[in-house]
Amino acid sequence: MMEYRILGKTGIRVSRLCFGTLTLGPLQSNLALEDGARLLEIAFEAGVNFLDTADLYGTYPYIRQAIRHRIERPVIASKSYDYTRAGMKESLQRALTEMDVPCVDIFMLHEQESHLTLAGHRAALEYLFEAKEAGLVRAVGFSCHTVAAVRAALSMPEIDVIHPLVNERGVGVQDGTAAEMLTAVKQLHQTGMGIFAMKPLGGGHLIPNSDVAFRYVLEQSCLDAIAVGMVTAEEVTYNCALFAGEAVSHTVAEILRQKKRSLQVQAWCTGCGTCTTYCPQGALHVENGQVVVATDHCILCGYCGAHCPDFCLKIY
């Protein structure tokens, strides 16, 4: 049976496995609408009731397709980079309209770095608090790749949920170690904050030891849920069984461990460098007129691809 937790003080009941939908859309696999929606349906059938998306991801159509006939709607978390009141209002309305839902369960500021960025985005945050009062949002929070942002939330009791990067090696944590991130998350969870983690496999870097990586996050009681990106029926079935504590096929596990993905730069890249500004890991630089990827830093978030004017960046 799939395990469920209450997400902090929100009262929202979520499956421990959250389906991270970034992998379905144009920034990564760019699956056909029906194929992506079917993967979500397979997850629903296995007990998953929690989806993570974002304004940036372009995956609202998949979610709308998958939930259109469901009697019980899954819990949906989304996020936006908008930092103004007007911009955040537009982002939330876009989510409501494109997913055809009356409210978004969790709406977050996307990728906050510290108390400084949170202060700079305060107007957007205030709008979300008002949207919560109006019933358009059930919980408000932010996502982050930094220990500093998690620590900043300790002095923000008005925040309901955070979505931090957590994995056993700290791959992708921009300002500290895995131990420092986990310590901060544990402190925050003790205050009643809802926490669902991202990148348990470090953007693919930990796939060769995925059993150890998953065990690490599943053993952390401070993590109410863990978002995992999935792109095949085999991955969905395997991860659902793993999170439910069921026996998993060693053969399937080995096949999935051997599957490698990477960020590919297409031949028509002009080296304009726009993408390098938007890489949160500093994994991109221009060399000899073309963008080069530092694979040891890239966590396959795909955010760079959304800002490439010529669609040169793809994850395969």
Image (tube, helix red, strand yellow):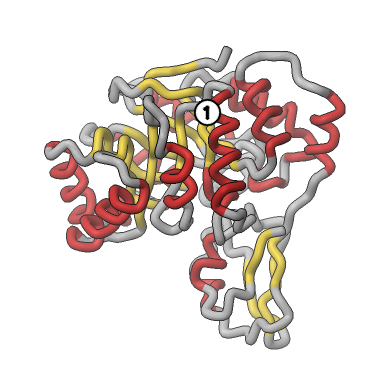
Query: Where's residue 309, x and y in %?
Result: 52, 79
Residue 154 picture location, percent across and down = 31, 34
Side (left or right) of 276 relative to 99: right
The quarter holding residue 25 reads bottom right
Residue at horizontal 38 percent and vertical 52 percent from the top:
110
- Quarter holding the N terminus is top right
Toward the viewer: 123 or 89?
89
Location of mark 1 (residue): 44
Q: In terms of depth relative to the viewer, which is nearer, 191 or 82?
A: 82
Image point 45% across, 31% down: which residue? 50
Three-letter code, disc 1: Phe
Position in image of residue 209 (x %, y %): 78, 34
> Circle 1: is it few (<14), some (14-19), or many (20+) Cα within 10 Å?
many
Rendered position, 112 above or below 245: below
Q: Quadrant of the C terminus?
A: bottom right
Q: Which residue: 54% across, 43% down?
A: 37
Residue drawn at x 50%, y 18% is: 221
Q: At numbered mark 1, what does the secondary structure look like: helix, strand or loop?
A: helix
State left or right for residue 309 relative to residue 139. Answer: right
Q: Is 20 rendered above or below residue 25? A: above
How many numbered discs sit on the rendered protein? Answer: 1
Q: Is residue 202 visible?
A: yes
Please indicate, yes or no, whether residue 113 appears anywhere in the rendered image: no
Q: How far across and how far down the image is residue 59, in percent?
A: 48, 52
